[in-house]
Image (cartoon, rainbow, N blue to C red):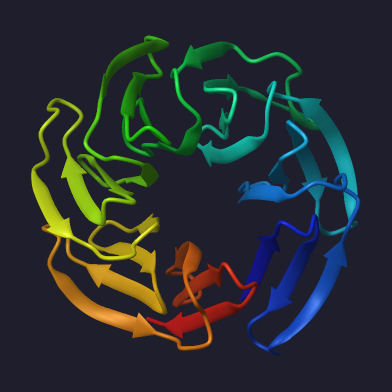
Amino acid sequence: AVVYTVSKDAMTKIYSLTSSRKLRSFSNMGTMALSSLLLAPDGLMFVGSWDNCIYTYKPECGKVLDVVEAHDAAVSCLALDSDQALLSGSWDATIKFWPQSEAGIRNQPTNVYDTAAEVSAVAMSSRSPWAVSTSTTGSVAVFDLRQRSHVKTFHPHTVATACQWLDDGFVTVGEDDMMHVFSPAYNTPLQTVVAPGVRSLATSSSRIYAGGRHGVGVYSLSCRLLMSLQCEAIEEVQCVSVSFDSGCVAAGSTCGTLAFWTI
């Protein structure tokens, strides 16, 4: 198993879980903090940066294939759909939809959505043409990508920090220490649980992985805590990812530490 990471130190690093060592590191994507990373099925890597750009990267040769000045402020988050189209969110309070080209993404987005607040997270459904975003004002926005339209915005949090899609809905968390599960059809949550310190999310078909202080909480889709994956070496989980191919949960912390658990 291989782990790809980006950080506020403007570095991209690749680690082997098998040998527990760093394989490669790169510093050729600008000098500002790197906020987000996505690995596409074709092997290309997309990286969002605080310099307002989206970089397309080929990890096997360590080469930047394309750079697009995507936003008027820092790129804060990225999401990829099943057709490998890219969705980006930014501190400029917009979300943009980018079809892929052979060497990355097209220079102009096909759609731009205004959110009226800095975007903290975006997520796209792999089973339906829906996208969701969260913002620093606590709002959650839902988009219909098939119709290229904004469906609705509502405010379930004081500051919303993360969102992820489930099979038939989506989950959000915020600085109010609440986790909500929604259906796209309703503004009121189907499930709610107090989740102290949780700021980041990953999901599978049957589990929610919520990153917080000292580890990751594993929840059922009904928001019942099933287990806690703890690591005292990390102060607060900044991001979390799960891979069933490698049987691993990975988390990155605010202090720069990586932690891994076998599932």
Foreground: 172 or 245? 172
The location of residue 133, given as percent across then percent down, is 40, 32
- Among the 4 quarters of the image, the one containing residue 103: top right
**In this view of the protein, can residue 221 be seen by the observer?**
no
In screen coordinates, is 63 left or right of 209? right
In screen coordinates, is 82 left or right of 59? left
The location of residue 168, given as percent across then percent down, is 20, 40
Residue drawn 44% across the image and 77% down it: 247
Residue drawn 27% across the image and 56% down it: 205
**Vertical relation: 170 (above or below) 200:** above
Residue drawn 83% across the image and 32% down it: 67
- Among the 4 quarters of the image, the one containing residue 159: top left
The location of residue 22, given as percent across then percent down, is 78, 79
Foreground: 18 or 29? 29
In screen coordinates, is 120 left or right of 206? right
The location of residue 126, given as percent across then percent down, is 38, 39
**Vertical relation: 202 (above or below) 167:** below
Count of all numbered marks drawn on residues in the image: 0
**Quadrant showing the N terminus:** bottom right
Foreground: 200 or 159? 159
**In this view of the protein, can residue 119 be seen by the observer?**
yes
**Vertical relation: 62 (above or below) 237:** above
In screen coordinates, is 137 left or right of 258? left
**Quadrant showing the C terminus:** bottom left
**Vertical relation: 147 (above or below) 103:** above
Residue drawn 24% across the image and 30% down it: 155
